[in-house]
Amino acid sequence: MLQDLWDFVSTRRKQLAIDSYLHVSAVVQCVIIATVIAVIIGILVYRSPVGSALATALASSILTIPSFALLGILIPVVGLGVPPTVIALTLYALLPIIRNTIVGLDAVDPGTTDAAKGIGMSRLHVLRTIELPLAWPSILTGMRVSTQMSMGILAIAAYAKGPGLGNLIFSGFARVGSPTAVPQALTGTVLIVILALILDGLFILIGKATTSKGLHV
């Protein structure tokens, strides 16, 4: 088994590198899109308990939709390939970031913002220079969670001809019984796990580099 796996990897290094890059690229881009949307939503609703609960509930409801079902709904509307993949990944990535944005902003000491307003800072200036920086560690944690989720979900997007390592896994399943079936599926799975761990490590480094020492947990 190990020899078959090594033979498969050694003969397809270039393609595996391309698929790995596409997998990571798609996840990172979708998480960035989701972060922009989620932070805007969080800013709009965090002062309202009803609004916060509604936003979180709606984002949570998306996660109850099975990946195959959501992709199946999107395919007739936007077709195969990148569009349904990006839409699905972005929707699934929203909940952790929305929730953590709300938690982070809500945790900012009201006394700090009141003092800032007292010296003439506008609401937008307070948000940009005080509240969002203080909430950043919480937002980044939400991004980490969304990234790990998206790494696995993207594999399923191969059903919609999406990019990445999922195509390798699906192709392996389709060839069950052939000598390369198991090595192919196993290689795709292991690479996704390895890449997910690498991305998580990068998020830790980003957190240390962009968070004030007084905010490190």
Image (cartoon, grey):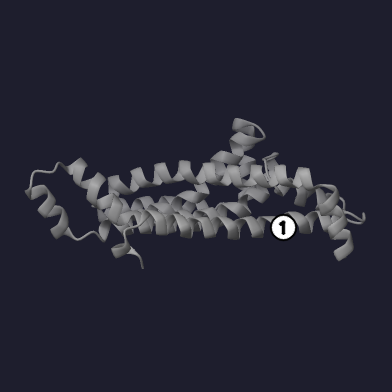
- Which residue sits at x=28%, y=56%? 134
The answer to whether residue 201 is seen in the rendering is yes
Q: Quadrant of residue 161?
A: top right
Task: Point out the image quarter for the N terminus.
Answer: bottom right
Write the residue at 65% across / 44% down.
Answer: 21
User: Which quarter of the image is occupied by the C terminus?
Assistant: bottom left
- 10 Å crowding of disc 1: few (<14), some (14-19), many (20+): some
Kindly indicate the quadrant of the structure image that contains residue 138.
bottom left
Up the image or down, 83 lies above or below 181; here it is: above
> For the residue labelled by badge 1, is the local secondary structure a helix, a strand or a loop?
helix
Total count of labels: 1
Residue 119 vs residue 138: left or right?
left
Residue 162, compared with residue 189, is above or below; it is above
Where in the figure is residue 159, as x and y percent of width and height? 71, 44
In the displayed structure, does residue 186 sit left or right of residue 136? right
Q: Position of residue 93 (x, y in %)?
A: 50, 50
Q: Residue 16 vs residue 162: left or right?
A: right
Which residue, as the protein is rendered here, is positioned at the far right?
A: 178
- Residue picked out by circle 1: 189
Whole-percent x, y for residue 139 in the image: 38, 54
Q: Nearer the viewer, residue 158 or 195?
A: 195
Q: Residue type at mark 1: give it.
A: Thr
**Rendered location of residue 3, percent (x, y):** 89, 62
Foreground: 35 or 83?
35
For the point 13% across and 59% down, the residue is 111
Q: Residue at x 67, y 40 (%)?
A: 162
| Left or right: 91, with 12 as reference point | left
Which is more toward the observer, 95 or 115? 115
